[in-house]
Amino acid sequence: MQQKITRDGFASKFGVLVAAAGSAVGLGNLWRFPYMVGENGGSAFLLIYLFFMIVLCLPVLIAEFVIGRRAQRDVIDAFNVLAPRSAWKGIGIAGLCAALVILGFYCVVGGWTLAYIGKSIFSLPTTLPGDYYAGTFTSLITSPVQPLVWCALFIALNAFVVSSGVKNGIERYSKILMPILFVMIVVLAIRAITLDSDMKGLRFLFQPDFSKVTGATFLAALGQAFFSLSIGMGAMITYGSYIPKDSHLVKTSIGVMSTDMLFSLLAGLAVIPAVFAFGISPAQGPGLVFVIFPEIFSKMPMGYVLEILFFTLLAIAALTSSISLFEVLVAWLVDAKKLSRRVAMACVTVVVGVLSILASLSLGMLPNISLFGKNLFNFFDSFSSNILLPLGGLFICLFVGWRMKPADVRDELTNSGNIRLPLFGCFRFILRYITPIAIAVIFASGMGWLQI
Ligand code: PHE
């Protein structure tokens, strides 16, 4: 296998795990998951999400790592190397587009998190009327300049980390930031549960009610699972290409998936019980954590400090994820277009900047910027999670299951025969049949093409 000696990579196995988990854990878990659970009726959505994570997403994650580490290339060249002159590289092209679409709204929300750090530092520790918080959120996201300035700052932070490279940038920062994040969210979850004295929130989260479940709920849960695990668009192919040859891909994948699920659960536990404790509707949409948390903090002892901590945590989580999205695009420009990391990052910054400006303005100043009846922000969000990622995941499974040589796949999974892998046949069967068919059925029923 052709390999570039100078290629940057992760320095340690722990670094790999932390960086990949850092990519997975982000706004998807802490901002998107709670409001999706709230909008989709709670426990049933949560259970379907957890089930999909284990049964469908884990095989896709392993498949992405296999492709990445085998090819040692960026997301497009990986397919060129493993399947020369074939249409499979379309998966890579779709992945690059998905990275841009996701970054187009992700950086806007990343900007909101920074804005809220600022707001929480300068907020007055007094009790304000209930609608004050919703009003503050709406006025932030609809203002013409403020969200753009914060978004620019968020993109600048990304540029700083990504242009420092894999070992010095991504790995170093993820290693410090992820554990801090974990401790913070555990503290918040404990606090929220103790607030929820009559356990309404916990019942909403854990007492299954399948009566409102539709095909759209399944697709939403699948999209959420893909989004929160960063799969279906090549982020994990790119990170896979930096994984050392002695890392255990299956164990790493299980570690990343468990960490990601844990964070989503903790985020649900930190948000939903608190929402019920204060008698607020859980179906608030994208504003949920931004509207609810400041209000909750204002009614809590030490709320001032906790609020600053929480939004810092959210911003850190967003950053360790968005750098992996930028990295997909930067790695391609560096590997395939031979640009330096800095120039590559500058090019990507310009494109993402324009998309983010349009997405942000579509929430306020320019509501006419819409596609398929949705403002651009919501369109980017649902188009990526419900369409691009599941379809990307489906083709990634087909590629590893049908196109890659079984011997090559086995070689990657066993580190050239150095580790045992008892269920290889079973894994291959899942990749060839179960996962692609399941994704196709969920996709078709979610789009309303299939009645089940
Ligand atoms: N998983 C990230 C999150 O939860 C988002 C993401 C999606 C990152 C796809 C990379 C690729 O916030």
Image (cartoon, rainbow, N blue to C red):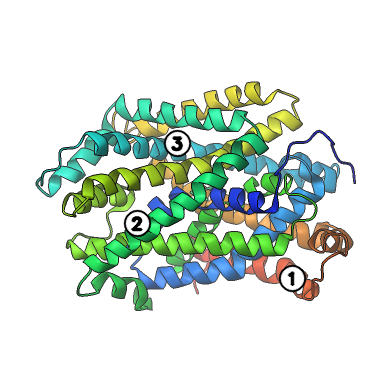
Q: Are marks 3 and 2 in contact (CB under 8 Å)?
A: no
Q: Amino acid at mark 2?
A: Tyr
In the image, residue 407 sits, relative to residue 12, either above or below, namely below
Does the numbered disc 2 mark a residue whose Cβ is under 8 Å from ligand 1?
Answer: no
Callout 1 secondary element: helix
Q: Earlier in the sequence, mark 3 or mark 1?
A: 3
List the residue tagged with mark 2: 35
Report crowding for label 3: few under 14, some 14 to 19, many 20 or more residues within 10 A (C-alpha): many
Q: Quick check: 41 left or right of 200?
A: right
Marks 3/1: CA–CA distance:
36 Å
Q: Amino acid at mark 1?
A: Phe
Q: Name the residue: 52% across, 40% down.
A: 322
* Label annotation for residue 427: 1
* Label annotation for residue 107: 3
In the image, residue 22 sits, relative to residue 322, either above or below, namely below
Q: Amino acid at mark 3?
A: Cys
